[in-house]
Amino acid sequence: MSEAKNYDLIIVGAGPGGISLAAEAKAAGISRDKILVIDKAEAHSWIIRSIYPDKKLVASNYKGIKAVCHGILCLPDVTKDEAISYLDWVINDTGIQVNYNEVVLKIETLGTARAPLFNVHTDKAVYHSRLVVIAIGVFGKPNKPDYKLPTSLRKRIHFDINSFDADNEQILIVGGGDSASEFSQFLVERGNRITLSYRRSSFKRMNAINRQTALGMHDNGQLEILWESNIHQVSVSDAGKPLVHFMEKQYGIRSFDRIVYALGGSTPKNFLQSMGIQFAGKQPDIDAHGESRTPGLFVGGDLHAGLRGGSIANAFNTSRGIIERICGTYMDCVPSVRPYEHRLIARRKGKQLPEQ
Ligand SMILES: Cc1cc2nc3c(=O)[nH]c(=O)nc-3n(C[C@H](O)[C@H](O)[C@H](O)COP(=O)(O)OP(=O)(O)OC[C@H]3O[C@@H](n4cnc5c(N)ncnc54)[C@H](O)[C@@H]3O)c2cc1C
């Protein structure tokens, strides 16, 4: 095997969290040859590409969380394609090396608290790095219901909407957050009849646009909403379709062509623990700058967002916190205060940027 390459910073995951951190690191003065981003997918921002509905508005205040930009990256409300192009542009402009289709298998902690050192083992190589940041998001592990799902329904039960084609079908969406509203809009536009099952009596976790859109579709008869509904079982109908058993008598047992769960994602605890991240309950045990109890080993992006869940703006901001710690404690660098290209994007579109 050839000799391991040395890096200052290895970032695992090329989503908004990983890309923004690479950009912050380069802008802070870390040589781009010393920064490596590794992603297991074939392209960056895999969650945006694979899970977002195509015509989705990428809202800066996702989940109703007020977007405030602390770092050099910042996005106003944009389309899915614009969000991907922006991140493409950041990668190309910074010239950061991103290795795709490469899976991180193990992170070995070497060195000392003052001078950390890690061996990052992937399916293709072993790298040495002074610092490692894990920004693999939470959507690789979508939340699943706590009842059993029949395996014969595998092709009729989904956790995203880009993995199947449906037209003129009766589809149940389970959830009540932004994704549930966006999935409903996407599938209604394709001529499907949508029922939404939500366990609460009103939408509390959606941003204003998604809430108004869902309620508007409901008022127009395009979306049926089963408020305060809870499913306790899914079985298979004679026609081989999902039969959904609701706990509430008024909803009874209903047949659908498909079910789409929009229940968010969860922290990949086992994976992170195996990489050396300790946990405090269900969340990684990290400080405000994303540093774990292993000095020099950080988590960024959605993994840093806690139970409320993250957003792109939040992922950008976690990178700011991380670079401040890196420059303050481990490396000779200075976080940049020069905002990135986003002002141009905003001006071109006449759009209002989030606060800075
Ligand atoms: C349907 C949906 C709609 C959303 N809409 C919005 C919105 O409108 N506005 C908004 O701000 N936010 C939105 N979000 C949330 C937003 O996408 C996330 O907060 C953001 O993508 C988090 O960025 P991240 O870099 O932490 O993780 P991710 O975007 O999840 O990126 C993680 C990256 O890590 C890679 N990866 C995973 N595991 C490994 C591994 N073991 N090794 C190497 N690489 C790995 C993945 O391939 C991926 O590229 C939405 C989310 C969903 C699911």
Image (cartoon, rainbow, N blue to C red):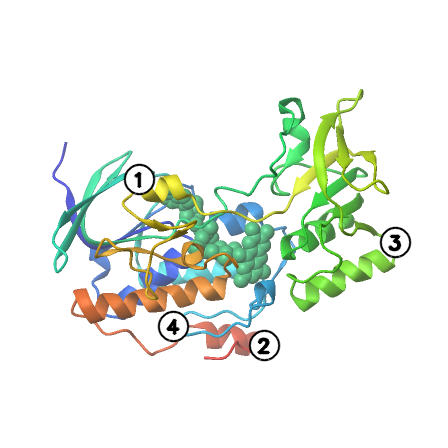
Proximity of marks 4 and 2: CB atoms separated by less than 8 Å: no
Q: Secondary structure at mark 4?
A: loop
Identify the mark at residue 287; answer none if there is no mark: none
Q: Real-space Cα distance between discs 4 and 2?
A: 18 Å
Proximity of marks 2 and 3: CB atoms separated by less than 8 Å: no
Query: Where residue 245 sits: x, y (%)?
Result: 76, 34
Label 2: which residue?
A: 351
First in sequence: mark 2 vs mark 3: 3
Label 4: which residue?
A: 72
Q: Amino acid at mark 3?
A: Gly
Residue at figure coordinates x 62%, y 24% from the top left: 151
First in sequence: mark 3 vs mark 1: 3
How many other residues sit within 10 Å of disc 3, few (<14), some (14-19) or many (≥20)? few
Q: Real-space Cα distance between discs 3 and 1?
A: 49 Å
Residue at figure coordinates x 42%, y 43% from the top left: 268
Left or right of 232, for residue 28: left
Q: Nearer the viewer, mark 3 or mark 4?
A: 3
Label 1: which residue?
A: 274
Left or right of 112, for residue 269: right
Residue at figure coordinates x 36%, y 64% from the top left: 319
